[in-house]
Amino acid sequence: MLGLYLHIPFCSHICNYCNFNRGLFDAGLKARYVAALETEIRRAGDGGAADTIFFGGGTPSLLAPDEIGSVIQSLRDRVALTAGAEITLETNPETVDREKLERFREAGVNRISFGVQSFQDAELKRLGRIHSADRARAAVREARAAGFDNVSLDLMMWLPGQSVDGWLGNVDALVEAGPDHASLYLLELYPNAPLKEDMARAGWSLAPDEEAAEMYLRAMERLERAGLEQYEISNVARPGLASRHNLKYWTDGEWLAFGCGAHSTRGGVRWKNVSATGDYIDRVTAGLSLVTERRELSASERLEDALFTGLRLVAGLDLEAIDRQYGTDVWKRFGPALAPFLTEKWLILEGSRLRLTRDGMLMANEIMAVFV
Ligand code: SF4
């Protein structure tokens, strides 16, 4: 089964830490972009069958529900979408109200992923976000009232000036909001992020590494106590509600991606669309190729990807399945380099399953470096 990803590169405001492919919202540009997106979908070859659709961005909830519905219909015309397919819309809390959420639901969306990031107004302001904590809480209630039974919240951890207690306050507020799924991301500061300048000016610093580790471990404990089970390094969910779309990225799956800068992976080939929104629209309109990079993955790259992504999952890697698929005995090849991590109790080998412990998740980069 394929996953389908749609990139929507518009935001009503640019956050000061954001390095995604996005730009400021412009109604005319948005209308032309949606038309181009539908043309790209129509031109795609045989679609096969899919069981997930994911609108990511940017801020996809800046599109009108009719536009989302029309894009979903274009996808249905090309691809056999399974009954009960998971259809996610990334949503910023300030862009919706109950009525708009109801209309997204009528358009076919059945999973809402809110970019909340923090439940403290001072932190939200620091990040350049334009919603308040109360708006985020209200948006979750509105989503429930609109009938959504699969709601995810994103929080960012290790923010400038954030203490362990401040962070745990955010985690408690998330639990109180009652989502079905949550993603906890570490703030990553790219070299020229305006937030870096703000931090220098205001004297905000990041908590030391040991405190970041404590934030992570204690958050996971609290979320699990609240019935949100960890299934991936950064993701927790109520039983049965892990993101089916994102699992494709971590389980060697295949996906087709549409829109500017979108990456697809299918049949061992990975390709990327042109990044700039205007360029994308022009090329679609002129009937030109959108692909700027295309690479057939070598057997060793595919194996490396499977190891990197699979180890992110709490369930870990099934070494027998990997041997069957890639003809590689992972333990024979990497065992000597991995053994010290077993001694440290960062890794566990149970039968043919190799998985990270929670402490090991903090050391994931170091451990995965063995596979390179
Ligand atoms: S809303 Fe999201 S995509 Fe848009 S600028 Fe902020 S972080 Fe970036």
Image (spheres, helix red, strand yellow):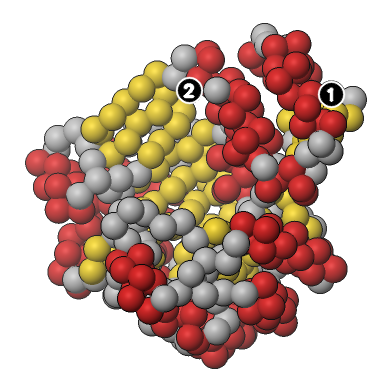
User: Does 91 appear above or below 6?
Assistant: below
Q: Is disc 2 placed on a helix, strand or loop?
A: loop
User: Does 212 appear above or below 294?
Assistant: below
User: Three-letter amino acid code at disc 1?
Assistant: Ser
Q: Is residue 335 visible?
A: yes
Does mark 1 have its CB less than 8 Å from ligand 1?
no
Which residue shows up at 54% across the image and 90% down it?
Answer: 134
Q: Quadrant of residue 331?
A: top right
Residue 269, image x and y in percent?
Answer: 42, 23
Q: Tell whether 228 sits left or right of 206.
A: right
User: Three-letter amino acid code at disc 2?
Assistant: Gly
Residue that protrudes farthest toward the right in the picture: 351
Which residue shows up at 40% across the image and 18% down it?
Answer: 296
Q: Residue 352 — which label? A: 1
Q: Residue 267 — which label? A: 2
Q: Residue 141 — which label? A: none
Q: Is residue 181 visible?
A: no
Q: Quadrant of residue 262?
A: top left
